[in-house]
Amino acid sequence: MSNFADFSTLLDSLYYTSSTKAKTRLLCEYLARTPDPDRGWAIAALSGTLQLEFFTRSTVKNLMLAHCDPVLFSLSYDYVGEMSETVAHMWPGRDTIEANIDQPMPTLNDIIIEFSTTPKKAIPTCLAGYLDRFTPSQRWALVKLGTRGLRVGVSARLVKNILAEFASNPTIQVSDIETLWHGVAPPYIELLTWLEGKSPKPDVTDRIVFHPVMLAHPVTDDELDLMDFSQWQGEYKYDGIRVQMVASSQGIGMFSRTGDDIAHSFPDVIELWQNTGIHGVFDGELLAFTEDDIATFNQLQQRLNKKKPTKK
């Protein structure tokens, strides 16, 4: 039986592990011993697909100010420089052993369900109750999870690589995971059981999914000499980003070259594409424009970094 303590141990281990090989081993072992749906929620949290912000940083800060000396908290936070670490060690909770006699350790699924169904006004009380019961490392994990700020050195791309490594079938590649990724949803039960060889491959034929792209690569002089240019098409390399548009009767998606969903960053492009009625899968270069010229890559990057850009 897995619980939230196991998840916090995983995060702690990943945070202090620099080797990709070691991170892969840690996560594969966690996936192998952890039942559904906890392991799928962990994958979602690590890859950034857990689209739930249980509480804000200001909620955490206000709780700390209500339970600790404000000056001491301010000095500690300024010294540590990280909210979750400060809360983990400063929270004046009950003795952990005494607190956990009253209630068993919740699972990761319990935590997610409770915070996603608790009324907003009751969130601070709910959070304080867990902080009282948890150890410092568990508090650290809870605050990181709840504010969607894990940052333990595991990217979405690495998660997909690790899932391919976890697969019982050696023929399953990262590209297979990428093709399914946007067609399945947390807690990824159908994906994980397929990787274990316990169920059929998820059917995503009616969903908007990413298709691995053919990326550009350097060509040597020797290779150029062997090419028959009548059999090739050339494309100018613009200063933009490689994207893939996927449009069907099910909707429209926009993905980066590595399969990240970036449609939310370009609502204007999505709206324009919807108006065309064109369906298919299209790879291309996305550029930013001024009134009369191609804008710099930096201007395009600014749009990518916006959390909620408008259609204007």
Image (spheres, grey):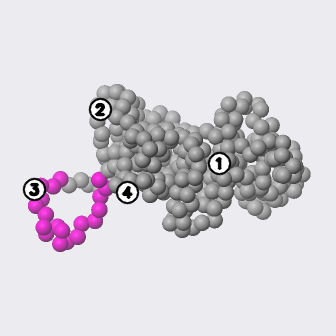
For the residues labelled 2 and 4, the Cα–Cα distance comes to 34 Å
Which residue lies at the image location 50% right of the left edge and 66% below the top edge?
21
Residue 10, quarter of the rendered image = bottom right
For the residues labelled 3 and 1, the Cα–Cα distance comes to 60 Å
**Front-lying residue, 10 or 288:** 10
For the residues labelled 1 and 2, the Cα–Cα distance comes to 44 Å
The residue that label 1 is drawn on is 2
Which badge, 1 or 2, comes first in the chain's sequence? 1
For the residues labelled 4 and 1, the Cα–Cα distance comes to 27 Å
The residue that label 3 is drawn on is 230
Which badge, 2 or 4, comes first in the chain's sequence? 4
Which badge, 3 or 2, comes first in the chain's sequence? 3
Task: Decide: is 134 above or below 226.
Answer: above
Residue 126, quarter of the rendered image = top right
The residue that label 2 is drawn on is 279
Given this view, does label 3 or label 2 mark the residue nearer the observer?
A: 2
Q: Mark 3 falls on what kind of element?
A: helix
Give the magenta-colored segment's residue range.
214-233
Given this view, does label 4 or label 3 mark the residue nearer the observer?
A: 4
**Front-lying residue, 38 or 196:** 196
Task: Decide: is 195 above or below 249.
Answer: below
Q: Which class describes the residues within 10 Å of circle 1: few (<14), some (14-19), or many (20+)? A: some
In the shown orientation, is residue 241 left or right of residue 42? left
